[in-house]
């Protein structure tokens, strides 16, 4: 598929098949994300991901969804995309961390679609509660 066609055909569904997602496919998606551009190659994005088979941890992530996004509980993979707002090398503020996260999530969405997976990014979750699973304290 040509890149422009990939962009044109990708969409964000609200219904999911409920089937499993192969771990190899997930690794391929996140390998592509690793190549997203970022300020000083900081890669300030952090992803917390759980598949349906991840039991209590998956239930914990589902618990962060707001009522209007309850449909997301049906997705095979559920995750949080987070931005670490300080540079690792010196602890100074990274004012473009959220921009870099946006670049990473766009690559994630396109690579996933290329591999036959659909994605939907939403702001409808309890941010304060979700901080308890955030790696590297992205609240900085």
Image (cartoon, rainbow, N blue to C red):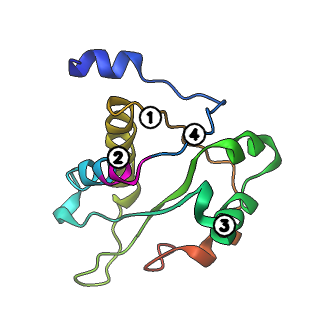
Contact (Cβ within 8 Å) of mark 1 with mark 2: yes
**In this picture, residue 74 sits left or right of residue 104:** right
The residue under label 1 is 117
Query: What residue is pinned by disc 4?
Result: 19
Q: Is residue 73 above or below residue 92?
A: above
Q: Residue lying furthest bottom in this view?
A: 90
Q: Report how far apart the C-alphas of labels 3 and 2 lie in the structure.
A: 20 Å
Q: Secondary structure at mark 1?
A: loop
- 120 within the magenta span: no
- Name the residue: 33% across, 51% down: 24
Residue at figure coordinates x 77%, y 44% from the top left: 70
Q: Nearer the viewer, mark 3 or mark 1?
A: 3
Question: Disc 4 or disc 2, which is closer to the eye?
Answer: 4
Tell me if label 3 and label 2 are in contact, CB under 8 Å: no
Query: Magenta segment, which residues?
Result: 22-27
Query: How many C-alpha atoms fall within 10 Å of the one at disc 3: few (<14), some, or many (≥20)?
Result: few
Q: Earlier in the sequence, mark 1 or mark 2?
A: 2
The residue pinned by badge 3 equals: 55
Residue 42: quadrant of the picture: bottom left
Residue 25 within the segment the image draws in magenta: yes
* Residue 31 at x, y percent in the picture: 25, 54
Residue beneath label 2, please? Answer: 25
**In terms of sequence position, does the residue under pointer 1 or pointer 4 come before the other?**
4
- Out of 52 and 64, give the one closest to the viewer: 52
Residue at 58% across / 46% down in the picture? 76
Task: Estimate the x, y position of residue 45 in percent, counting from the top left.
Answer: 37, 62
């Amino acid at each position: 598929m040509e890149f422009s066609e990939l962009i044109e055909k990708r969409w964000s569904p609200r219904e999911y098949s409920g089937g499993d997602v192969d771990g190899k496919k997930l690794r391929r998606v996140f390998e592509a994300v690793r190549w997203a551009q970022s300020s000083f190659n900081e890669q300030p994005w952090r992803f917390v991901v759980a598949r349906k088979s991840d039991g209590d941890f998956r239930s914990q992530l589902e618990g962060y969804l707001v009522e209007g996004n309850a449909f997301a509980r049906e997705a095979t993979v559920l995750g949080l995309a987070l931005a670490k707002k300080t540079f690792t090398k010196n602890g100074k503020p990274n004012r473009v961390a959220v921009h870099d996260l946006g670049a990473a999530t766009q690559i994630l969405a396109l690579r996933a679609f290329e591999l036959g997976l659909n994605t939907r990014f939403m702001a409808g979750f309890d941010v304060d509660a979700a901080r308890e699973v955030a790696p590297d304290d992205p609240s900085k």
